[in-house]
Image (cartoon, rainbow, N blue to C red):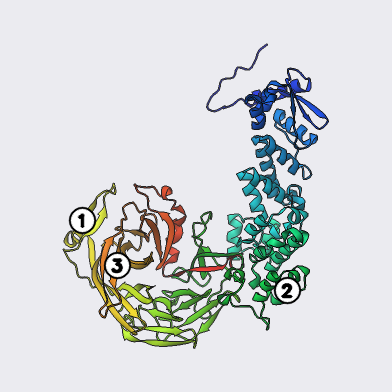
Amino acid sequence: MAGIEYKKTKDLGLFRPHLLELASNLNRLRSQDSLTDVTVTIGNRHFRAHRAVLAACSSYFQAMFTSGFQESNSSDVVIEEGTSVVLEELLDFAYTGIVNFSKENIVDVLTMESYLQMKSAVDACTEFLRERMMDSEDADVAWGDGIVFQVYLIAEHHEMVELKDLCWQFIIDDFIPLSKTDGFRTCVTAELLTNLLERSDLTKPTHQKLPWHLKMSEMLGIIPSEAIASLLGRSSTTKYEEEQVLQAVVSWLEHDWITRKTHATSVLTKVRLGVIPQEILRQYLDKDQFKESPELKELLTDVLLPDGASANPGMASGSQTSDMYASRGTITALVATGGTKIGNNGPFARYFHYSNPDTEDTAWIPLLKLPKPPGVPNIQDHTMTTLDGKLYLAGGGRHNLNSIMRSMLQSFFQYDPKVNDWKRLPNMLCGREGFVMVQLDNLIYAIGGCDEDGELTVYDETFNLEDQSWYEGDDEYVGACDPSAVVYKNKILMYGHGINDGFPSDNVYYYEDDEDGDEDERYTAALAMEEQREVRTSLHTLQMYDPAAKKWYSLMRQRHHVHTVHGDNEQYSALVIRNDKCYRVVYDKMRERHCWISKPRVNELVMELESSAPSAQVGKEEEQRWLPEYHVPGAFCIEGEIYVNVNGCIVNTGQQMPKEKPTIDRVNFSRWLGVDSPEMANSAVTMYTFDHYNLTL
């Protein structure tokens, strides 16, 4: 009889027909009770099997047969856990690799899989649930009646990480519908419920991820959102409200009040009570649980006000916490507005989700529902800042698409996320662009930049939030283009440079890494110009404003050189506060190529700010040796941690600078590649926490 000659090759790998035939023959031997050597008993049922097969599929049986237990020398094994129906399913799986999961048996099967330590069976269960979760029609089969909570607790108890994570994500995505099931009311523990309530995305809309072509069509308005929602079988506007979360928690408490009342206060504290309408909260005061528990009654009455208005989170007292007033679904991200690349039909605002390590997005994403301020299309070189959850936008230039001319703006706007609109505030005293705003003592300071005539401004102006008015500063400072400013020890520090004066010097060197990145080649100004490198100089000034004295002080002046290689380069500077220290950052950047021509110079500033003649000097320089700056322009390192300067907004990436020459992947910087795209030119950027779902979906 001619057989199949099998030779293992790289292309063929394992010969699957052999494995299938082996499993089939073993199962046939079992059904014929041939060569079986053990009887597994559960209840009044007995199953014949082969020790070797059981030990190969179950760590429980392997330990039993090989560790010197009584059963290792006995032909009878008794199982005390589970049912005979489930055991029969798992024995069939051991011989065939097939198990019949259903809504009715999945919890029992998983429980016995865990007891018998059958890893392959657990993996099969996980895959079954994952497939059903992806199909909305089959989801009820896998998760109906809140079975997901039972599965989650089993997975957590037996440290089944993959299955636990799968269940957790499904619970987060569909918390409100699941909270109405018996499984939620009976199975969820106080610890699990608390962990769920701490999630900021618990009430997010549930929808499928749009394919790229549909996403672009929706963004551009080619296909309406409703049509895309219909195509995908989902609603683009569904959003659960916080009162539904409160209703779920109260339902959970009512189901077993005697046992759970000790957890009532700690659980309800995690509900965002401050964003729930007052009339709804008042209805809960009449419930028996709130009447019985003084702590619960206090929790609600602290949030309620006699006039029905919402309490001020800044005045939280008693059992209140600021989290009670934070809407779910918020994210913290870089937000950019305007810029030279944004036309009349382009998105006015974009965001870059740097704070989420799991995000797939590596580019700026339009905030489609954040409107433009009235009357200022195509704004650029303006400035933004944030205060008390609101955005403030000031100044800049308004570009005329039909002309190279543009007009300077004095306008000042406040964005209120509650109404998703801009409010025009009183104009600044003069039009400015290329300036910076900082907040101190309930005042917003506008510092630096150029005025309507293109001249450097020499006076700051302040906006008083109480009387909603602008005031000119009392003292004059040295003007600066695109300065950096920070609040440090209740004073304002500003660092920046004036107009390049084109004065070359042979006393300052231009640095450029060699091919290996190990040595720095130094060019004098004369040699740089001989090699067609233009050398320009600019005067950088560190200044301090003391609000108590209402006076500006010049702390330090330095002349820096900007070098170009067949192109126009720019010099950037920044001030960064870290661990109660202030650092100065200076670097050159090729405008056209969006890359650096030298490593950043980062120094700690040694300052004496309290004397009658405050001063500063440059301290030790921070190591930048293995910084991946050519991949992410604007990156620099302080105390071993990498920062990024995005249009003047300084972001701590949380990444450590490697100790040896890295690739971009080894420092996990690939997600920052798109942060300095050409579309960001002349945009204003700030860090902002906003309702992701209201503004993007």
Instruction: Spot the residue most to the top.
Output: 1
Q: What element does badge 1 sit on?
A: strand
**Can you say whether 547 is above or below 37 in the image?**
below
At x 66% / y 30%, what residue is drawn?
Answer: 57
Q: Is residue 483 left or right of residue 111?
A: left
Three-letter code, disc 2: Ile
| Residue hosting label 1 | 522
**Can you say whether 356 is above or below 393 in the image?**
above
- How far is the residue under mark 2 from the one under mark 3? 55 Å
Of 564 and 658, nearer the camera is 658
Three-letter code, disc 1: Arg
Considering only order in the chain, which callout, 3 or 2, is on the residue closer to the N terminus? 2
Considering only order in the chain, which callout, 1 or 3, is on the residue closer to the N terminus? 1
Of 252 and 644, nearer the camera is 252
Q: Position of residue 89 (x, y in %)?
A: 76, 34
Q: Is residue 224 visible?
A: no
Q: Position of residue 294 (x, y in %)?
A: 70, 71
